[in-house]
Amino acid sequence: MNYEPMNLSQLLEQVGLLSQVALMLLMVETLLAVALEPIMGGLSDRAPHWMGTRFPFISSALSSCRLC
């Protein structure tokens, strides 16, 4: 089998998204990551919890994603 490397925008185009929509989706995802990762990291570093500092945030995020 011959596999070619594929970036995410090509993968999104392959499943039927227009190239402009795929690039816009990637830009929004990157901007959200730039904004939210430092905020959530700061919150989790200050949150004392018996399961650790990050587990409650990760588990609540996964639970909310499951609802979507």
Image (tube, rainbow, N blue to C red):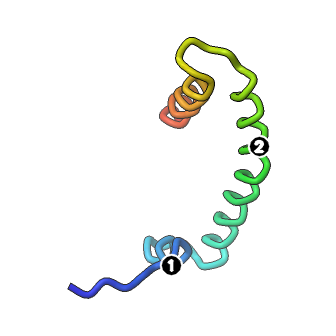
Does residue 58 sit above or below 26 in this rendering? Answer: above
Q: Residue at x 56, y 12 (%)?
A: 50
> What residue is rendered at 65% in x and 65% in y?
26
Q: Which of the 4 quarters of the picture holds residue 64?
A: top right
Residue 18 circle label: none
User: Which circle's residue, 2 or 1, is located before the other in the chain?
Assistant: 1
8, 13: nearer the viewer? 8
Label 1 sits on what residue type?
Gln
The residue at the far left in this view is 1
Q: Name the disc covering residue 38, or none.
A: 2
Q: Amino acid at mark 2?
A: Pro
Front: mark 2 or 1:
2
Q: Residues within 10 Å of mark 1 (few under 14, many from 20)?
A: some
In the picture shown, does residue 44 fall above or below 13? above
Rendered residue at 71%/44% (across/down): 37
User: Residue 38 placed where, x, y %?
Assistant: 77, 43
The answer to whether residue 18 is above or below residue 1 is above
SS at mark 1 in the image: helix
Quadrant the N terminus occupies:
bottom left
Q: CA distance from mark 2 to mark 1?
A: 29 Å
Q: In this image, 32 relative to 53: left or right?
A: right
Task: Tell me what residue is drawn at x 42 percent, y 82 percent.
Answer: 5
Mark 2 residue crowding within 10 angstroms, few (<14) / some (14–19) / many (20+): few
Residue 56 horizontal/vertical position (percent) = 58, 22
Residue 20 horizontal/vertical position (percent): 66, 77
Q: Is residue 61 left or right of residue 4?
A: right
**43 lies above or below 12:** above
Query: Could you say which quadrant of the image residue 22 lies in?
Result: bottom right
Q: Secondary structure at mark 2?
A: helix
Q: Which mark is residue 10?
A: 1
